[in-house]
Structures are given as structure tokens and as C-alpha cells.
């Protein structure tokens, strides 16, 4: 088990969250009594097998789905709907295909004056490594590049929290490794709070400060594992392997195939 | 809540009827009838046995014209889609023929078939032939190459390939095309009947106006056309689902 | 690649020449008095041009299409988008539109004549009715097919309902709407010809009917038909070009 963030540092608070879909005979209880706290600047992974409800959890936290019971509070305020201060990053299909890279990244910046907007866009284009592609359309980009556009678009509005829902799921494994280190680089540079949903155990140990391991439907938090390895993480270090194997064991998976 | 959903379309129609009625009353038009009059006109047609007669006449022509077209169009479309060279040669001509309204063929139809049923059926035939051919052609072209390759891998001859891989693969698209083309055929039959024959819903509309400004019958005819159009569409959808 | 391009041009050309030759000999061989030979049709074109009616007729037809179609575009797209985004609206009015759609524009002619009399206004009205429904339906469907992800992202960035429609829903639905626009343009062209056959005294549809009635001038009839076909094709190609513009191209590629 791990230490929750100190009270002064608490940013996001999920208390006794219940989510149920459907009614009467077709009732499905998806999430039960979820309690979670996330501190400012933390990188938290929500880990679980496909279909266990972790995406639903993230969607409720993001304000896209209503809770059946309990609440989500951020900075003391209750979450009632999507908010530009907390941007959700979908898989690379979330990029708007009718806008260029520039257009996408600048999407949330309509309140800025043109000069400021251009500066902001250029900063994030550089940050995600897409210089030269500002006028390209998403259909001309690879999956990894599209994902960078979406991350840049999210960051450009300077949100407090980023929610990422299996953002690298559609990418090949090599690109995935590259994207993970990119994400960590950006995280350290921008110092955002990040909630990251994945079904990939390795990914969660490589990225997170804490890993929230969830069980299957109805989903409950099984355990929270603190990853105390410093960045940049050595993927062959004994501690990494120990933590990883620990989670394998938690989920009940054997090592040998 | 579910009941409310089901009732919504009725609400929409009700609003239309009310709006129509109000418009007619407020415009003090002597000619355009309100919904009440149209309903009475429908009843009159039913009583005189004309309702059935005209509907059947129109359906009869549509059926012959449409089926005739389909019988030619599907094989033709398949051949044109299958053989790339042939498709390339013929496509431009199909594209030029397509924008020519079937009605523009009326003088030619009358020249070849005289006034009467054959002319009307010919017009419907033409109106259905082109869309159906083009649709079949496109359907063949869109069969994924991997399926064709898999078939060849299993040693199927060209004919078997057609029968066992290609045809089942394009069946859904063919049904959609059939439904759309039937809609077109239904549009065309009305137009064809206005000019060349003496029965059917298109004729009813033109005749009611010419013979005595019976606009209530005109609109009654339009209502029937709309209803049957929906029925035909729904009918094919049922077969599609199977 | 070069061979392909050659094929695209020469194969139809070859077939066309074959066809014209076949047509020519068929006319000669059957000793028909009325059906025109290719040469007669060509002369027909020349005559129309000489008489100074060729371009005015084409212009009249195009103008009517432009007016009716343009109106349908301007009213149909907003109507369709609204119907598609307000949940209960599509359920209430959808079936109504489905009901009105199969009613051939031709069937509306008597209504048009009552409302507007014989003349261009009637034809424009008919073209409007004929184009309106496909555009509304395509817009409705386009809006319905917008992935929830896009509207969710839009809301996430704090867009109001109106801004959401303008900046997310409309661009996302645009490819579908364009398909409807292309369809409607084709229909509009079909209808203008039909409407002109009945309700006015200029334009290509009128040319065909008049050529036959006034003197069994089948050469002019066929000339008119060819004109209709070629111009219709031209319109179709034009709107296909719009589909290749970058901001909508994404919707037309095979993924």
C-alpha cells in the first residue's frame, strides 16, 4: 500500500463513487465505492483489464458521465461537467480531421489575441516535436504524430489536470515506447497533474508515481502501488522488475506463458 | 417515456396538418384545399373504387419497369465492374446518360412505342437501369481484394469466385441500391403517367386539375404517392434485414 | 501510370466512335424517316446556335437550377443540422420528411402552378422542393454520425452549444452534407428539365418538348438530350472538385 498525498497537496478527490448503468432488470453496476486522492503534479495510472470500468471512472472524473452516488471534487469544487481546466485526451482519433495541426492545437485558444495565440501554438508544436508539420492535416500524419497533436492541443490551454484514456493503445509497440518517454518529458517540463488509464502493466510502472490497480466488474480499487523509482527509469533495474512483478502478482497472473 | 417517443412522429404530422389548415383558412384561397377536404377526397376515391384502380395501375408499371431494369442492370453492372477495361470504356457514357431525366426520353419513347403503357414502362425502365447499373458496378469494384485473393488461394475458378465470394459480398450493397432505385422508379412512374397514359396516380393528379380544378383530389393523390413510397421503402428494408 | 491514362481517354473514345458509327448505319439501314442520324444531330446543334437560342436556353436552365438549389442549400443545411442535433426534433419530423420525399417533384407541379402560376417561379419552387429533402436528410444524418468524441472534446474546451455546432458539429458533418449536396444537384438538374417540359417556355426541357411538338424535329430532341447529359455531367464534376478540398478531403478517403 502507499501513502496518499499530504492534505495540503490534495488536488482531486474521489469519494465513495458509485456508477450504475441502466435500470431495473438491465442494471449494471460498473463502479463501486471508489475512493481516490490525487496530489498536485502527480502522475497516477489507473490500471485494469479491458472492460473493467476504468475508462468509465475517468469519464466520470472528467465530467462526461454522471455518477450514481458519491462525488468528485477538484480544488474543493464538485465536478458537474467537462471543464477547460481539465482536458481529456482520447486515442488519436480525437484529433479534429478538418483542422491542420496548427488549427487543432489552437482550438481552445480563441480568446487570445492572434500574436499571443501564434506564440502559444509554436511553443507546443516545438514541445511535442512536430515542427514543420504545422500546416499538415491529420490524415497526412502517423498515429503517433496525431497523438502528439492531441496532447499539444490539450496542453495549449494550460489545464490543471490531464486525463489520458489509453492514449497509446492504437500505436505499435515501438512508437508506444517513444511516446511514453515523450509524455514524461512533457510532464516534467509542464508540471501537470496526470491521470492515465491503461491495461498495460509495464506501461503503468514505467510512467506513474502511483498505480491504482482495479478489479473487474463491479470495479473496485484493489490496491494502490507507489512507484518509488526516480526518473529516468531504468527498465532493467531490480526495483522496476520487483514492482512490476508485484503488480503481476496482485492481478493474479502467472509469469510463464 | 417510451410512449412519448413513439408519439413524436405523430406530433410532427399533427403540426403539419394544423399549419396546412391554418394556411388555407387564412389565405382565403378558393382553390387550395385544407386537410379535411383532402381526407374527404380520399374517401370519395375509395368509394368509387378508383383508389385501388389507380394505385394498382401505378404499381403495375413500376413493377415491370423496375424488375426489367434490375434484370439487365445487375449482370451488366457486374460485368462492367469486373472487367476493368470495359468499365473504363463505358463509364463516361453512363455518366453522360445519368443526368438526362427519364422524362427527356418521352419523345423518343412515344416515337418507338406510341402513347400508352409500354411507353410509361420504358421510361421507368430507363430511370431505374442507370442507377442500378452504376451501383452494381461500384459494388463489384469495392469488393476487398483480400477476399478475392483468398478465393483464388483456395483454387476457385473465376465463375466460382463470382458465385461464392463476390456475390455474397456485394449483396448488402445491392439491396441498398435496390431500395434507392425503387424510390427513383416510384418518382418516375408518377411523372411518366402524367404524360403518356390514362390511369395511375400521376394521371389522377394531372387529370383532376385539368378536368375541373379538383385540387382536393390532386393533393389526395400526392398523399397516396407519399404513403406508398414509404411502404415500398419499408418493404425492401424488411427483406434487407433478412 | 501512363498506360492507364491513355486507356482512360482512348477506350471510351474508341467505344464512342464505334457507337456513333453503329448509330449512323442503323439509321441508314432501317430507312427511318424520323430518327436522326449523328450527322443530323450535329447539324441540329449548329442550327440552334445560329438561331441564337442555344446559350439562352442553357442559361435559363442553369439559372433556375441555381436559384432553386441555392435556396435549398441555404435553408436545408441549417434545418438539417438543427433537426439532427436536437434529439426529439429528428424523431418528430424525420418521418414527416421521409413521407414527403418520395412525392415526385412532378407531382408538386399542380401545387406550384396554383401558388405561382406558369413560369420561372414555379420551376424554381419545384427545384427547391426537390433539392431540399436530400439536403436536409444528408445534413441530419451527417450530424448524427459525428463521433461523440468530437463533441465531448468541444465541450471539454468550454464551447457553448452554439459554438459547438459551428466549430465542431458542422465541420465534422460536412463530408456527409457534401454527399447530399451532390445528390441534390443531380436531382435539381433532372427536375429542371422535367419542370421546363411542363411549366415554361424556355430552357432545355422546353426545347425538347417543343422540338417534338412543333415539328417532330427529333434531331433537335436528341441534340437537347445530349446537351442535358453533358451539362449535368459537368455540374457533377464541379461538385466532386469541392470534395477534394483539404478541409473536407478527410471524409472521402478510404481509411
Image (cartoon, rainbow, N blue to C red):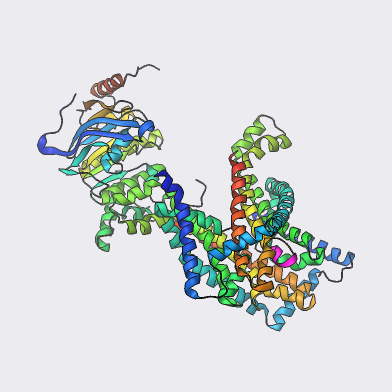
In the foreground, A147 or B241: B241
| Image coords of residue B212 (percent x, y) | 66, 73
Quadrant assignment, res C232? bottom right
In the foreground, A56 or B182: B182
Farthest residue, direction left = A8
The residue positioned 81% from the left and 64% from the top of the image is B112
**In the picture shown, does residue B145 fall above or below C142?**
above
Farthest residue, direction front = B47
| Image coords of residue B135 (percent x, y) | 64, 50
Quadrant assignment, res C171? bottom left
Farthest residue, direction bottom = C51
Does C71 lie within the magenta span?
no
Magenta segment range? B191-197
**In the picture shown, does residue B103 fall above or below A214?**
below
In the foreground, C106 or C141: C106
Q: Is residue C205 visible?
A: no
In the foreground, A207 or B166: B166
**In the picture shown, does residue B53 fall above or below A149?**
below
The rendered magenta stretch, by its main secondary structure, is classed as helix
Lateral position of residue B169 relative to residue A78, left or right: right
Lateral position of residue C254 relative to residue B162, left or right: left
Lateral position of residue A227 relative to residue B10, left or right: left
Amino acid at each position: 500500500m502507499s501513502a496518499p498525498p499530504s492534505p495540503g497537496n490534495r488536488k482531486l478527490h474521489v469519494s465513495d463513487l458509485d456508477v450504475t448503468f441502466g435500470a431495473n432488470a438491465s442494471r449494471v453496476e460498473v463502479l463501486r465505492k471508489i475512493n481516490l486522492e490525487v496530489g498536485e503534479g502527480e502522475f497516477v495510472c489507473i490500471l485494469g483489464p479491458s472492460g473493467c470500468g476504468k475508462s468509465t471512472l475517468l469519464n466520470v472524473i472528467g465530467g462526461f458521465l454522471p455518477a450514481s452516488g458519491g462525488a468528485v471534487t477538484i480544488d474543493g469544487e464538485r465536478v458537474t461537467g467537462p471543464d477547460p481546466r481539465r482536458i481529456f485526451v482520447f486515442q488519436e482519433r480525437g484529433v479534429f480531421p478538418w483542422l491542420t495541426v496548427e488549427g487543432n492545437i489552437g482550438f481552445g485558444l480563441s480568446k487570445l489575441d492572434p500574436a499571443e495565440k501564434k506564440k502559444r501554438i509554436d511553443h507546443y508544436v516545438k514541445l511535442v516535436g512536430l515542427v514543420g508539420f504545422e500546416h499538415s492535416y491529420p490524415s497526412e500524419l502517423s498515429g503517433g504524430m496525431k497523438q502528439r497533436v492531441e496532447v499539444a492541443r490539450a496542453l495549449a490551454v494550460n489545464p490543471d489536470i490531464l486525463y489520458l484514456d489509453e492514449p497509446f493503445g492504437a500505436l505499435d509497440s515501438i512508437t508506444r515506447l517513444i511516446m511514453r518517454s515523450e509524455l514524461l518529458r512533457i510532464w516534467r517540463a509542464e508540471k501537470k497533474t496526470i491521470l492515465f488509464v491503461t491495461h498495460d502493466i509495464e506501461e503503468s510502472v514505467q510512467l506513474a508515481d502511483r498505480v491504482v490497480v482495479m478489479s473487474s466488474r463491479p470495479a473496485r480499487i484493489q490496491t494502490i502501488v507507489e512507484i518509488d523509482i526516480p526518473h529516468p527509469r531504468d527498465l532493467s533495474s531490480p526495483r522496476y522488475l520487483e514492482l512490476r512483478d508485484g503488480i503481476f502478482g496482485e492481478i493474479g497472473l502467472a509469469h510463464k506463458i | 417515456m417510451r410512449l412519448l417517443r413513439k408519439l413524436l412522429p405523430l406530433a410532427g404530422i399533427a403540426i403539419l396538418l394544423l399549419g396546412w389548415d391554418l394556411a388555407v383558412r387564412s389565405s382565403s384561397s378558393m382553390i387550395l384545399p385544407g386537410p379535411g377536404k383532402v381526407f374527404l377526397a380520399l374517401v370519395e376515391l375509395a368509394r368509387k373504387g378508383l383508389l385501388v384502380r389507380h394505385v394498382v395501375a401505378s404499381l403495375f408499371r413500376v413493377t415491370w419497369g423496375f424488375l426489367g431494369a434490375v434484370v439487365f442492370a445487375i449482370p451488366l453492372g457486374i460485368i462492367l465492374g469486373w472487367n476493368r477495361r470495359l468499365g473504363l470504356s463505358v463509364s463516361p457514357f453512363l455518366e453522360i446518360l445519368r443526368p438526362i431525366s427519364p422524362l427527356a426520353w418521352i419523345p423518343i419513347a412515344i416515337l418507338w412505342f406510341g402513347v400508352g403503357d409500354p411507353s410509361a414502362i420504358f421510361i421507368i425502365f430507363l430511370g431505374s437501369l442507370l442507377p442500378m447499373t452504376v451501383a452494381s458496378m461500384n459494388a463489384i469494384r469495392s469488393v476487398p481484394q483480400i477476399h478475392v485473393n483468398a478465393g483464388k488461394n483456395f483454387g476457385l475458378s473465376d465463375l466460382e469466385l463470382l458465385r461464392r465470394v463476390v456475390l455474397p459480398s456485394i449483396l448488402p450493397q445491392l439491396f441498398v441500391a435496390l431500395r434507392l432505385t425503387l424510390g427513383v422508379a416510384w418518382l418516375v412512374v408518377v411523372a411518366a403517367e402524367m404524360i403518356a397514359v390514362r390511369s395511375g396516380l400521376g394521371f389522377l393528379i394531372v387529370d383532376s386539375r385539368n378536368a375541373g380544378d379538383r385540387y382536393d383530389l390532386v393533393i389526395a393523390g400526392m398523399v397516396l404517392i407519399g404513403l406508398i413510397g414509404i411502404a415500398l421503402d419499408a418493404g425492401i428494408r424488411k427483406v434487407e434485414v433478412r | 501510370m501512363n498506360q492507364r491514362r491513355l486507356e482512360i481517354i482512348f477506350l471510351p473514345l474508341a467505344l464512342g466512335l464505334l457507337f456513333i458509327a453503329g448509330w449512323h448505319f442503323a439509321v441508314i439501314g432501317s430507312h427511318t424517316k424520323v430518327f436522326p442520324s449523328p450527322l443530323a444531330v450535329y447539324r441540329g446543334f449548329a442550327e440552334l446556335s445560329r438561331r441564337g437560342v442555344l446559350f439562352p436556353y442553357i442559361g435559363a436552365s442553369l439559372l433556375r437550377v441555381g436559384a432553386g438549389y441555392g435556396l435549398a442549400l441555404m435553408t436545408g443545411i441549417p434545418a438539417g443540422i438543427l433537426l439532427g442535433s436536437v434529439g426529439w426534433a429528428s424523431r418528430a419530423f424525420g418521418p414527416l420528411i421521409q413521407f414527403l420525399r418520395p412525392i415526385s417533384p412532378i407531382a408538386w407541379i399542380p401545387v406550384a402552378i396554383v401558388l405561382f402560376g406558369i413560369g420561372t417561379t414555379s420551376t424554381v419552387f419545384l427545384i427547391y422542393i426537390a433539392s431540399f429533402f436530400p439536403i436536409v436528410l444528408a445534413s441530419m444524418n451527417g450530424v448524427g454520425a459525428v463521433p461523440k468524441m468530437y463533441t465531448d472534446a468541444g465541450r471539454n474546451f468550454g464551447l457553448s452549444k452554439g459554438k459547438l455546432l459551428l466549430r465542431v458539429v458542422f465541420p465534422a458533418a460536412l463530408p456527409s452534407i457534401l454527399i447530399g449536396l451532390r445528390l441534390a444537384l443531380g436531382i435539381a438538374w433532372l427536375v429542371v428539365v422535367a419542370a421546363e417540359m411542363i411549366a415554361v417556355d424556355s430552357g432545355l426541357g422546353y426545347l425538347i418538348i417543343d422540338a417534338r411538338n412543333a415539328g417532330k424535329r427529333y434531331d433537335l430532341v436528341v441534340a437537347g438530350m445530349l446537351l442535358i447529359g453533358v451539362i449535368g455531367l459537368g455540374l457533377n464534376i464541379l461538385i466532386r472538385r469541392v470534395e477534394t478540398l483539404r478541409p473536407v478531403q478527410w471524409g472521402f478517403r478510404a481509411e
